[in-house]
Image: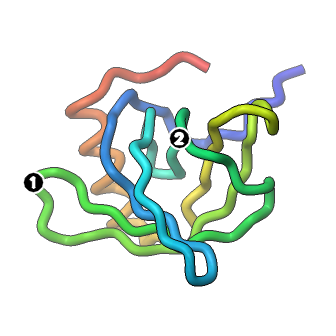
C-alpha cells in the first residue's frame, strides 16, 4: 500500500523560507520544494498539525509568496526535520513555483 500524500513532484532546491508561529519568526533553508510545500531537514520541528505563516521569494522572481502552511510530516520527533504543506496559494502562484522547481532542480524520488 502506498502512503504517499504528495500531489506535486519535489525538487532539491535550497532557498530560504520564513516561518512564523504566533509572535515567533524564524528563517529556514528548505531541502526540497514543490508547488505543494517544502521540507526542512535541519529545522527544529513543530508538532504535526501546527499552522504557520509562510513567506519566501524565488531567486529572480519579484513577487514574494505569502500563505498559510501546515506541518504535515515530522520523520523523527526526537530529531530535526519537518515537512510543511502550503495552503491557499493561487493556481498562478503554484504554477510559478512548479516552473521554477522544474527549471532549477531535478525531481526527487519518493
Q: How far apart are marks 2 and 1 (CA)?
A: 22 Å
Q: Is mark 2 on a helix, strand or loop?
A: strand
Lateral position of residue 68 relative to residue 1, left or right? left
Residue at left 74%, top 65%?
A: 50
The image shows a total of numbered marks equal to 2
The image quadrant where one finds the N terminus is top right
Residue highlighted by disc 2: 40
What scheme was used to colour the molecule?
Answer: rainbow
Q: Residue at x 33, y 21 (%)?
A: 106
Q: In which quarter of the image is residue 64?
A: bottom left
Q: Describe residue 98's horizontal placement relative to residue 2 as left or right.
A: left
- Is residue 88 in view? no
Near mark 1 (Cα within 10 A), the count class, few <14, some 14-19 or many ≥20, is: few
Residue placed farthest to the right in the image? 1
Q: Which mark's residue is nearer the viewer, 2 or 1?
A: 2
Measured from the top left, where is residue 35 in percent x and y?
44, 50
Q: Position of residue 87 (x, y in %)?
A: 58, 68
Residue drawn at point x = 78 percent, y = 31 percent: 76
Q: Which mark is residue 60?
A: 1
Contact (Cβ within 8 Å) of mark 2 with mark 1: no
**For residue 4, which numbered disc appears in the image?**
none
Q: Looking at this view, name the residue that lies furthest to the bottom.
A: 23
Task: Report helix, strand or loop for mark 1.
Answer: loop
Amino acid at each position: 500500500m502506498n502512503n504517499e500524500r504528495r500531489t506535486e513532484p519535489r525538487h532539491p532546491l535550497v532557498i530560504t523560507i520564513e516561518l512564523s508561529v504566533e509572535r515567533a519568526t524564524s528563517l529556514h533553508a528548505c531541502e526540497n520544494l514543490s508547488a505543494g510545500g517544502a521540507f526542512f531537514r535541519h529545522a527544529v520541528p513543530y508538532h504535526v498539525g501546527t499552522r504557520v505563516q509562510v513567506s519566501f521569494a524565488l531567486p529572480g522572481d519579484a513577487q514574494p509568496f505569502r500563505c498559510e502552511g501546515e506541518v504535515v510530516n515530522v520523520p523523527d520527533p526526537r530529531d530535526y526535520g519537518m515537512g510543511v504543506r502550503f495552503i491557499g496559494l493561487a493556481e498562478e502562484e503554484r504554477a510559478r513555483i512548479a516552473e521554477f522547481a522544474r527549471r532549477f532542480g531535478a525531481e526527487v524520488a519518493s
